[in-house]
Image (spheres, grey):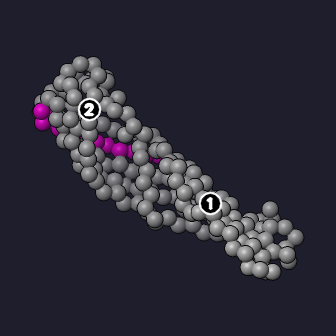
Amino acid sequence: MKLAIFPVALIALGGTEIAAASNYDEGQWVTTFMAGSQLNPQESISPHVRTDVGALGITELDSLQIDDAFRSGPSFGIETGYMSQSNLEPFVRLTYSKLEGRNTSIGSISSPELDAATAIGANFDDMKSWALNLGTRYFLSDSGTVRTYVTGYLGARKSTRLNSSHPYRSRM
């Protein structure tokens, strides 16, 4: 399963250029360091499933969201660009991000033989991701305190596998 995570930094359109935008000249190298946390997308990892095995019992697996399985972890990045023209900056960006796995209930088993339903849990491992992007930023204005821009990039992302184990069964 491939998981896409969108950094908060991509939401802002040119907001990082406010402080020293007017000082960028043609032929200048620009380096940006990023640190923080990323937003988890509101996506489902698995749908709700109910299996009735007649007189033996019922197994239910709950719909599982990404926020159920992971907490946002740290995110770090470095981006280096070169102002090839006063309004054009090709760049390379390397980022690392981590989602911290949670121990969570994913469903239940009930049977006439059991006094109460038994919870099914899963312990999700941390998921780490590296990304390398190459792109170009086109500044819509050449001068001023605030310089808005449009960015396009291509890249590759390598994420660890999505692993979980079933650590516990407890009475509900």
Query: Image quarter for residue 87?
Result: top left
Q: Which residue was labeled with disc 2?
A: 149
Q: Which residue is mark 1?
A: 63
Q: In this image, 150 relative to 167: left or right? A: left
Displayed quadrant of residue 102: bottom right
**Residue at position x 12%, y 36% from top?**
84
Q: Residues within 10 Å of mark 2 (few under 14, many from 20)?
A: some
What's the residue at 12%, 33% (across, down)? 85
Q: Which residues are magenta?
A: 73-85
Task: Name the residue rendered at 23%, 38% in the picture.
Answer: 137
* Circle 1: residue type: Ser
Query: Where is residue 4 shown, x and y percent of the image?
Result: 42, 54
- Mark 1 falls on what kind of element? loop
The residue under the point 87% across, 70% down is 115
Residue 57 versus residue 88 in the image, above or below: below
Query: From this viewpoint, which residue is outermost toward the right?
Result: 115
